[in-house]
């Protein structure tokens, strides 16, 4: 399954995972964006009691991925926490499991607009952006960036109507030297990949990428929004 | 009615449409007020429609003025200005006309106690439209609270003729005690005159639009003063309206009225109707309820009527005088619809009405109600539980479910107790509960309400708004597609947030709108009658020749379905194998059965390819022949395949979306910022996935299952049917298609394929786009 969804991006091979994460085989690195941990409890503070399982679920999926792929590096591309106080609201055992996970490999929190800083006690290193081989990693794509760039922030999503059937799922978006990851958090909604905010960044070659059981599907964004 | 008032008992007035029911309901109130018995708010009137309250208010003013009474009548609905609402709370009128949602909101204010303390009467109009719905649940709970605030309150229900009078009396009565309700029956009125029209004795094999009958319909319109033409779906109304205009050689004023049109446009049509400047209106269920306006002397029902009660209600729109018969003409769209029209006519003339199933009240509605009461004042759980059990839909509410509801409101009701420090309710030293923060009260009032519209998009041509369509319909369109809307052909341009932009098109033939607005289920009563028609050739002499020949041919080529057996035909056609089952249980039940059957056929290696359902039959086609249908129609299919399928289907997500909003889990509205339906969809679907995975037994998921089962799938009807048919399945292998099977096969191609094939579709879309952009 991991090789079927492989693709080349600026000289390196990546694998788009159906779990909404990106696998970088050469570095044995896992990348995810927009975990939005403790989004549910953030709403609960205002009296809206969403199911308090979002962090638990995200964490379980991360643990599985790390173990299954034997990851040695882990990059969170920002908005890992839904708000600046989110880390303090983690339930004790979730917090302990997260600490265990971050201490088992090289872990980097790239900071985002929702989480300008990350609680050091959780482990891992925190930075606002990073140059890695030929790539730049950051939370929100920078239109002036000249190097190939991996980012998150936009929660891209594909909406299709095929034979009367509506399809609606998270996707990767790439083009113009940029690869934007889908959001990982269980309670995070999305932005249509044809939205000008995304499409503008990717240029005319922009594509939506969707991993499936039978291989990677690619959709030219221009054709989606005609 | 006056007698019931004198005796101080609750009353249920049952009378046909047009018998002056509403005024009769108000008579005791007016008499009492005339006697000078007034201490604040005297009577509350609740109707299902905002527009109805406005009409009633207008109609009440006349007798009040004639009698020279000084009585203040005011309406209170979602449209009432907030300063007026605030004034009504401190200085209420004598008579308040409102809707269940507005009444429920009133009860969330601390002033409610003082406001309703001296309430004498509550009048519930069109009670039959409320009883088996979630709005009915909310209203019933509100009645329980009113009764507590004003123990001597008299409840008065007004109802059209219904099959289950005792059931409605029980629904109305406090504590389900129907003995406390006096039944008052209105004069039955002259029996209606109902004809079935088969123009030139031609009747199509399939379809529902009755396009063949357009000249005949036009002819009828010409020969009557004012004609009301009912269709079953909005799409059919649009189509017929257009066809009538093409046929309109005399340029008669004909208008269109359905629930998707802009409110302002509908009001204009209604006004034109009552001023007598229209000759005909093509309408859908949007005109089923409401007061009489205009001098209608003919009702035409195009397509099958689907239920005897509905037919009578529609016929009642004509001729609001009891001494003359109402006149109606039924125009079936195909041969099965002919049988159904005949069945409906017989049932209507025999006053054999359809029963509506009553069901237990929803827990999501209960959560909303309890939070509302908490906003008004602190409550004591035991007292509240007793009060709620006096509302009939909650008469059997278990204490455990009530406690779960409280916990849900308090802190979400999750077994992982993560939100204890954010409690919405806090327990006071005396054991009562109160709301923890005033902000939550404001939030509740903004979110409360039970009618949930499917997300709708506004349709605009340039800057002009024409009305609204379901989001799901808009999603199917691609730019350049043409569709019928508001009586004209439009070309789809683009979607922008919650607006669909279109431009006028000059193409005469639009792509037919697939939107299902107002598709009605076939009542069990009519289904039974149609089944009996088929089984009794002696009854066929009343049918037109073409229908008789059709049935005779069926008898020769295959067999006729028996009244108490299930005929299952199998035949090959174009290298596929077809199986047609004549169940007569309505489209919704057949649809569910089709989904389940194909799953089971898959398991048995029969390679099913698709299915189609209508109100009368189900057709499935597959690569391999079904040798023995018996195991396919076994009742265990409802256990094995149903739960699997339901758990994965979009059906539950749709129900959850409603439950999440009604219960207050998801906000409908923030102060100053209304969420669009689209945003709502995303978040509630995501919540559903998380909740189902981690806490499948949560209160809201229980409410969701109840909602989905009751609402869409007709599971109970299907279960009873399969049970009944055990040992009565009649397989009939044929070498080719039978006459009875033709109508259902004509519907093939109109069904959507189901979700399991999503990955295949993704691949197909990619291929198509690659070709298109190469």
Image (cartoon, grey):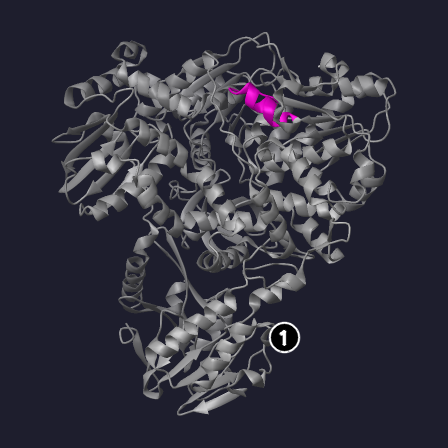
Foreground pick, B182 / B80: B182
Q: Position of residue A124 (x, y in %)?
A: 50, 86
The residue nearer to you, when weighing B460 against B173, is B173
Numbered range of the magenta stretch: B159-173
The residue at 13%/30% (across/down) is B734
Q: Chain of mark 1?
A: A
Query: Is residue B458 in view?
Result: no
Question: Is residue A29 left or right of B22 when viewed as pictured?
Answer: left
| Left or right placement of residue B709 versus residue A9 in this view | right
Above or below, B72 against B650 in this view is above
Q: Is residue B323 on the magenta stretch?
A: no
* Residue B522 % position (x, y): 41, 28
Provide residue B432's location: percent of width, then percent of height: 74, 48
Q: Position of residue B567 (x, y in %)?
A: 23, 27
Residue matched to label 1: A85
Closest to the observer: B204 or A132? A132
Q: Quadrant of the N terminus of chain B?
A: top right
Q: On the rendered structure, is B335 left or right of B361?
A: left
């Amino acid at each position: 399954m991991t090789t079927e969804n492989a693709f080349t991006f600026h000289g390196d091979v990546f694998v788009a995972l159906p779990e909404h994460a990106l696998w970088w085989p050469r570095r044995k690195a896992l990348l995810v964006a927009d975990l939005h941990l403790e989004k549910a409890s953030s709403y609960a503070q205002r009296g809206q009691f969403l199911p308090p399982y979002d962090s638990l679920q995200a964490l379980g999926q991360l643990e599985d991925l790390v173990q299954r792929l034997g990851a040695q590096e882990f990059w969170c591309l920002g908005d890992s926490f839904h708000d600046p106080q989110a880390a303090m609201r983690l339930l004790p055992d979730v917090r302990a499991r997260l600490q265990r996970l971050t201490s088992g490999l090289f872990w980097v929190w790239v900071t985002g607009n929702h989480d300008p800083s990350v609680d050091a006690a959780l482990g891992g290193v925190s930075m606002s952006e990073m140059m890695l081989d030929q790539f730049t990693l950051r939370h929100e794509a920078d239109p002036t960036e000249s190097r190939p760039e991996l980012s998150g922030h936009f929660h891209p999503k594909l909406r299709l109507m095929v034979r009367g059937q509506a399809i609606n799922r998270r996707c990767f978006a790439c083009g113009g030297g940029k690869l934007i990851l889908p959001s990982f958090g269980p309670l995070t909604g999305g932005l249509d990949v044809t939205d000008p905010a995304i499409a503008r960044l990717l240029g005319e070659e922009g594509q939506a990428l969707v991993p499936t059981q039978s291989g990677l599907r690619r959709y030219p964004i221009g054709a989606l929004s005609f | 009615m006056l007698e019931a008032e004198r005796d101080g008992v609750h009353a249920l007035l049952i009378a046909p449409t047009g018998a002056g029911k509403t005024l009769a309901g108000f008579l005791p109130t007016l008499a009492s007020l005339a006697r000078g018995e007034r201490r604040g708010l005297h009577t509350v009137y609740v109707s299902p429609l905002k527009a109805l309250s406005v009409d009633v208010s207008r109609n009440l003013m006349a007798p009040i003025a004639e009698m020279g009474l000084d009585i203040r009548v005011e309406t209170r609905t979602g449209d009432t200005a907030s300063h007026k609402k605030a004034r009504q709370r401190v200085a209420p009128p004598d008579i308040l006309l409102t809707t269940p949602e507005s009444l429920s909101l009133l009860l969330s204010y601390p002033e409610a106690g003082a406001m309703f303390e001296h309430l004498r009467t509550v009048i519930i109009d069109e009670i039959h439209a409320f009883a088996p719905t979630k709005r009915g649940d909310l209203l019933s709970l509100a009645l329980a609270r009113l009764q507590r605030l004003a123990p001597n309150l008299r409840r008065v229900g007004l109802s059209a003729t219904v099959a289950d009078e005792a059931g409605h009396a029980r629904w109305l009565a406090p504590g389900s005690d129907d003995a406390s309700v006096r039944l008052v029956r209105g004069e039955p009125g002259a029996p209606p005159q109902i004809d079935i029209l088969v123009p030139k004795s031609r009747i199509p094999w399939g379809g529902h639009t009755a396009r063949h009958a357009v000249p005949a319909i036009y002819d009828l319109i010409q020969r009557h003063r004012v004609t009301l033409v009912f269709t079953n779906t909005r799409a059919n109304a649009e189509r017929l309206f257009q066809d009538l205009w093409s046929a309109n050689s005399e340029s008669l004023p004909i208008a269109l009225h359905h629930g998707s049109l802009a409110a302002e446009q509908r009001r204009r049509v209604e006004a034109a109707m009552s001023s007598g400047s229209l000759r005909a209106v093509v309408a859908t269920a949007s005109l089923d309820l409401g007061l009489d306006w205009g001098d209608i002397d003919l009702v035409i029902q195009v397509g099958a009527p689907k239920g005897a009660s509905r037919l009578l209600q529609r016929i009642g729109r004509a001729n609001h005088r009891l001494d003359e018969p109402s006149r109606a003409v039924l125009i079936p769209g195909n041969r099965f619809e002919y049988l159904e029209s005949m069945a409906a006519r017989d049932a209507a003339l025999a006053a054999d009405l359809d029963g509506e199933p009553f069901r237990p009240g929803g827990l999501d509605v209960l959560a909303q109600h309890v939070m509302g009461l908490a906003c008004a004042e602190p409550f004591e759980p035991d007292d509240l539980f007793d009060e709620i059990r006096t509302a009939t839909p909650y008469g059997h509410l278990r204490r455990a479910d009530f406690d779960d509801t409280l916990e849900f409101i308090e802190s979400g009701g999750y077994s992982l107790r993560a939100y204890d420090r954010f409690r919405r309710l806090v327990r006071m030293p005396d054991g009562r509960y109160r709301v923890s923060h005033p902000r939550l009260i404001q939030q509740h009032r903004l979110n409360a309400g039970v009618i949930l519209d499917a997300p709708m998009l506004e349709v605009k041509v340039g800057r002009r708004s024409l009305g609204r369509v379901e989001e799901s319909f808009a999603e199917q369109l691609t730019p350049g597609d043409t569709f019928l809307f508001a009586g004209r052909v439009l070309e789809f341009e683009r979607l922008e947030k919650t607006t669909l932009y279109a431009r006028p098109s000059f193409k005469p033939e639009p792509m037919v709108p697939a939107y299902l607005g107002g598709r009605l289920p076939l009542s069990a009563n009519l289904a039974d009658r149609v089944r009996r028609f088929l089984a009794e050739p002696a009854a066929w002499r009343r049918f037109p020749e073409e229908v008789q020949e059709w049935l005779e041919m069926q008898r020769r080529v295959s067999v006729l379905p028996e009244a108490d057996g299930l005929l299952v035909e199998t035949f090959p056609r174009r290298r596929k194998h077809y199986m047609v089952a004549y169940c007569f249980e309505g489209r919704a039940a057949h649809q569910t059965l089709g989904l389940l059957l194909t799953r089971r056929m898959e398991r048995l290696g029969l390679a099913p390819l698709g299915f189609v359902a209508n109100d009368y039959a189900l057709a499935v086609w597959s690569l391999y022949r079904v040798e023995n249908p018996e195991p396919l129609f076994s009742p265990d299919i409802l256990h094995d395949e149903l739960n699997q399928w339901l758990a994965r289907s979009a059906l539950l997500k749709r129900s959850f979306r409603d439950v999440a909003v009604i219960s207050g889990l998801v906000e409908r509205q923030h102060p100053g910022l209304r969420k669009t339906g689209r945003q709502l969809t995303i978040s509630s679907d995501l919540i559903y996935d998380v909740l189902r995975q981690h806490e499948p037994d949560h209160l809201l998921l229980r409410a969701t299952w109840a909602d989905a089962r009751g609402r869409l799938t007709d599971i109970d009807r299907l279960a009873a049917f399969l049970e009944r048919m055990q040992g009565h399945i009649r397989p009939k292998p044929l070498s080719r298609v039978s006459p009875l099977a033709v109508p259902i096969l004509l519907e093939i191609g109109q069904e959507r394929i189901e979700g399991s094939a999503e990955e295949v579709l993704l691949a197909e879309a990619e291929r198509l786009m690659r070709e298109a952009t190469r």
